[in-house]
Amino acid sequence: MVTHSSKWTIATLGSHSALQILKGAQDEGFKTLAICKKGTEKVYKQFGVADKIITVSDYMDLLKIQDKLIKDNVIIIPHASFIAYIGPANIEKLKIPYFGTKSILEHESDRNKEKKWLEAAGLKLPLIFSKPSDIDRPVIVKFHGAGGGRGYFLAKNTADFEKKIKNHEGKEYTIQEYILGVHMYAHYFHSPLTGETEIMGFDKRYESNVDSIGRISARDQMALPEEQIDPSYLIVGNIPVVVRESYLPRFLEMGENVVKISKKIAGRGLYGPFCLECVITPEGVIYVFEISARIVAGTNPYIHGSPYSWLRYDEPMSTGRRIAREIKNALKDDKLKEVLE
Amino acid sequence: MVTHSSKWTIATLGSHSALQILKGAQDEGFKTLAICKKGTEKVYKQFGVADKIITVSDYMDLLKIQDKLIKDNVIIIPHASFIAYIGPANIEKLKIPYFGTKSILEHESDRNKEKKWLEAAGLKLPLIFSKPSDIDRPVIVKFHGAGGGRGYFLAKNTADFEKKIKNHEGKEYTIQEYILGVHMYAHYFHSPLTGETEIMGFDKRYESNVDSIGRISARDQMALPEEQIDPSYLIVGNIPVVVRESYLPRFLEMGENVVKISKKIAGRGLYGPFCLECVITPEGVIYVFEISARIVAGTNPYIHGSPYSWLRYDEPMSTGRRIAREIKNALKDDKLKEVLE
Amino acid sequence: MVTHSSKWTIATLGSHSALQILKGAQDEGFKTLAICKKGTEKVYKQFGVADKIITVSDYMDLLKIQDKLIKDNVIIIPHASFIAYIGPANIEKLKIPYFGTKSILEHESDRNKEKKWLEAAGLKLPLIFSKPSDIDRPVIVKFHGAGGGRGYFLAKNTADFEKKIKNHEGKEYTIQEYILGVHMYAHYFHSPLTGETEIMGFDKRYESNVDSIGRISARDQMALPEEQIDPSYLIVGNIPVVVRESYLPRFLEMGENVVKISKKIAGRGLYGPFCLECVITPEGVIYVFEISARIVAGTNPYIHGSPYSWLRYDEPMSTGRRIAREIKNALKDDKLKEVLE
């Protein structure tokens, strides 16, 4: 087998976190390939991160060029857009070497499986109320498939819920305990080679319009039509943040426990980058709302390293580069099969 | 002509973004000069960015020492405070070599010319209503010359406008479509030498008091006197942010189009650093409110490089340093005239 | 005396800002020691910043191992958690070499002494009203010892105060002028060796729940029970920010004045890292609420240097490293006694 990184090409779809994935791969000595939708190539060219660009009219064209890519020693790095566009079913059948445990994806996308996983790991999740009459505290009502959280509303009790749900007839929804606290997205990397779960950094999302309604005074909010001021949660960017240092032991343990349980439910378990999407309450309780079992865009502020990665590494270590480093280390130790599927 | 950067001095007024301009110039081998108002020299001394400091009692004194500066091979880099203090008319007549197209400034400062420019570039601008009776959606009413946006108010229709405008008799105002979304300031650099428009980074402003009123509960806001809770927009700092990667192709195109149109309206057109001041809606639509045709303070978080500049350059590349790099490249290729006026 | 940094060990409690203190010490050639509470060691091991870890069941155990630490040439760096856990009285009696002026701590913790200090330095502080009947403007009512600011409320006048205080019978409180503006935390380092006060950076805190209530629309806030929406101020992280460059001369002067006055009130005065906790109003007035006479967690985003420290130093200079650099410089010049107590 070819064991030097320069003989391998690291590839991903040109979106989401591809810039750091490709830049990181170059820094580790790999060749890089961006698979871009027509019209987006310029970005990957401008930043010089792609040694080669393949332009497609549809991301699914990736499936048609698999044999060629395999011959060229290509390794695919998945990110959220990759998973969304190619789809878990196609990823399962993907023949190109792929970084990550494919069977973990269903535990991320299926709400019930995700809940079981996170609870087994000892994490604190918000309650779900299966019937409106069960509501015994403030809740947030989330509509299924609502783009960017459109129409989500808060209700303080069953009566309040019944009144407000009238505007949403026929929609499917989940009634979730409303946790008031600040968001904190924790980025991890689990190395199957060392067995260690590393803290890579933290971010907070920058969401439209919810991160801007607070800039409108309460009086002016009342003056605007309700449908315009209704909060929505379209992620348009990410902001760097560091967490209170005394919380790090808990965050580290949470990440380690998630990995531990993953090994019981999905093959070799979760490895590579992942993220716990948390809310911290005024009492310092950390609630987990979701897990992302792959690289998140929240690591994009740290293309040149995060405050945390600089502690451990004496060079700029983005999460994208950390992936390439893992593959390079596996090549060196002849353990490539342990990091690819 | 003297072609080595060490024979030239890069100078600017000691304010706004002078720290990165001077530091960047030093890193590219130039000598540096800060022209400081009495009492502000200490900052430029402390950070070691100014090889020489000239203290003035009034920034306009710059005009009196022009001949001396020209003899010393000084190049002036304009920033917002430079333009505000010296004034477009004086800049037009400035004899010291100046980085940038002077005639672009009127297209930035004149609202109508700016509107024409941005619309010709295909950008989406908020609507302007010329008469109150035209109002057919929520609007923000902005008063001319209002320091930091004092008194700006929202109105949901003509009647609401008529009621609220009564408190502002005699003031001139603009009625602008109110776009609810989050702010995103996109930093660019256009190189006349390579013809390329580079994305340098993004920030969000930190404004008083508007970025703090959301920390007051709606109930408490109601308790405060209206005049104290009224939003104002004094810029007191900047916060780093990265943008959703799938938006980059659009941002790049927007920057390129602005440069393309600028060449039709102002000499050699816009070059060097500039910024598009945007709001992104929950639908992912990017509105442009303004263009800054020079370096913005929003690049100050990136004195050691932004996530984006680290992708392209293997060294810390602030926007200030990028300017000096362009001048250095021009010197090398004997094209100094192409980057100075 | 041993003058090379490698013969000395820099130590602190494993919390607050210990990661940067220890990493910075390593970068300056010191050995490092983390004194960790059982269960937190893993973090300091993972990031590789502690050459040695001592696990204690209670931080006060530090007092029992003093003789051993002194024999091992250990120097203690205090941070907020260090001061909170060990306590000023014990710190006063501490025999291990300690970085900082111990007698400054009472001027930080005693509200009256702090007020005198800051006012003597010419800083602008919010007014305190000693009786409710004195209230002549909006105020914030703060309860003594309220964890994370629980129950703090705003009142617009005496009548409003009298109505709201009824829910808080028996509590001790302070009535403070309410200053509406944005928070800005300014980090400094004063070097007793050079006599210079350096600006190290700025941050804004990330607090639960107050930094998230603005994401709830005014209508929804009204729908929630008052006790849940009540603002609280638990610090859960920090966000990097840069300040408007034209404010730097004022911030520098404020820091210098605080140091100048400190020399009149506490031995050799304040040296090493400190922080002024400010609010900037829409008029650009800088109010100071508090001083922290030691390293603050707000410097944690800058483990690899802040935009400001990169201007002055050609290497990553965290505040933690700046401390170690000072000690190293003192060792070199045989002036260790000038930086330790």
Image (cartoon, coloured by chain):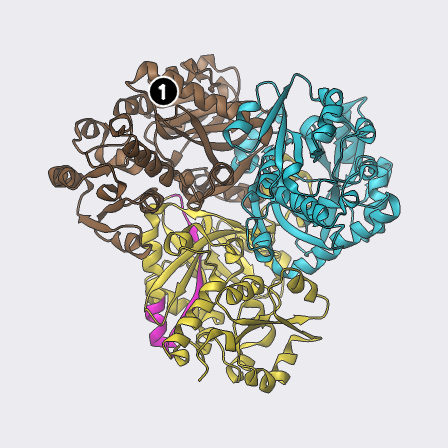
Chain colours: A yellow, B cyan, C brown
Q: Is residue C4 above or below residue A329?
A: above
Q: Is residue C91 above or below residue A63?
A: above
Residue A103, position in %: x, y?
44, 78
Q: Residue at x 63, y 83 (%)?
A: A65
Helix, strand or loop under label 1 = helix
Quadrant of the drawing holding the N terminus of chain B: top right
Q: Nearer the viewer, residue C223 or C61?
A: C61
Q: Is residue B140 left or right of residue C29?
A: right
Magenta part of the chain: A259-282
Query: How dense is the environment of label 1, judged by Cα within 10 Å: few (below 14), some, or many (20 and up)?
Result: many
Residue B324, position in %: x, y?
65, 43
Can residue C11 be seen? yes
Residue A132, position in %: x, y?
49, 59
Quadrant of the drawing holding the C terminus of chain B: top right
Can residue C179 be seen? no
Q: Is residue C157 left or right of residue B267?
A: left
Q: Is residue C321 above or below residue A257?
A: above
Is A333 one of the magenta-colored residues?
Answer: no
Q: Is residue A15 left or right of residue C124?
A: right
Kindly identify which residue carries mark 1: C114
Q: Residue at x 67, y 36 (%)?
A: B8
Is A272 one of the magenta-colored residues?
Answer: yes
Residue A309, position in %: x, y?
41, 55
